[in-house]
Amino acid sequence: MILQTAARYSYVLDGCDLYWCIEWDPGLVVVRMSPGKELEWVALRSPIPNFGGREPLPEDGDPDEYDEDAENPQYNLVFRPWDAQFDEEYREMRSFAPADEEVRARVEPLWLA
């Protein structure tokens, strides 16, 4: 039972597979939903050593040495789509677009069956 969450999330459609990407302490949970298959998921630690105020493990590295400009797949999967959802300028700048009618016509029947 989840009593409260401030987690942010996004959805990624790849063919007929839907990935639900959820930011969650201590990192990222990705759930793959595919028609006719069981749910699959993976939990990954954030590349940010002290993400969410957690105490970093030795393998996380020193928070003072973390490069904030380094590639961060968690940020790319969760926050860029989140930002695009609410900011039209950002959406246009990053070329985000909702699924068109062809994609919806192809995918929705698989999920509604």
Image (cartoon, rainbow, N blue to C red):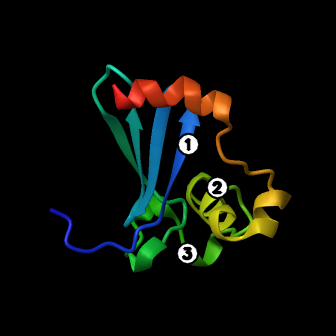
Residue 93: x and y in percent read 85, 60
The amino acid type found where label 3 is placed reads Pro
How would you rate the neighbour count of disc 3 (Cα within 10 Å): few for under 14, some for 14-19, many for 20 or more? few
Residue 55: x and y in percent read 37, 75
Quadrant location, the C terminus? top left
Dot placed on the residue nearer the N-terminal end, 2 or 1: 1
Dot placed on the residue nearer the N-terminal end, 3 or 2: 3
Q: Is residue 80 left or right of residue 93?
A: left
The amino acid type found where label 1 is placed reads Val
User: Is label 1 or label 3 in front?
Assistant: 1
Is 94 placed above or below 86 here? above
Dot placed on the residue nearer the N-terminal end, 1 or 3: 1
Residue identifier under label 1? 12
How would you rate the neighbour count of disc 2 (Cα within 10 Å): few for under 14, some for 14-19, many for 20 or more? few
**Residue 15 seen in the current view:** no
Quadrant location, the N terminus? bottom left
**Residue 105 seen in the current view:** yes
Residue identifier under label 2? 76
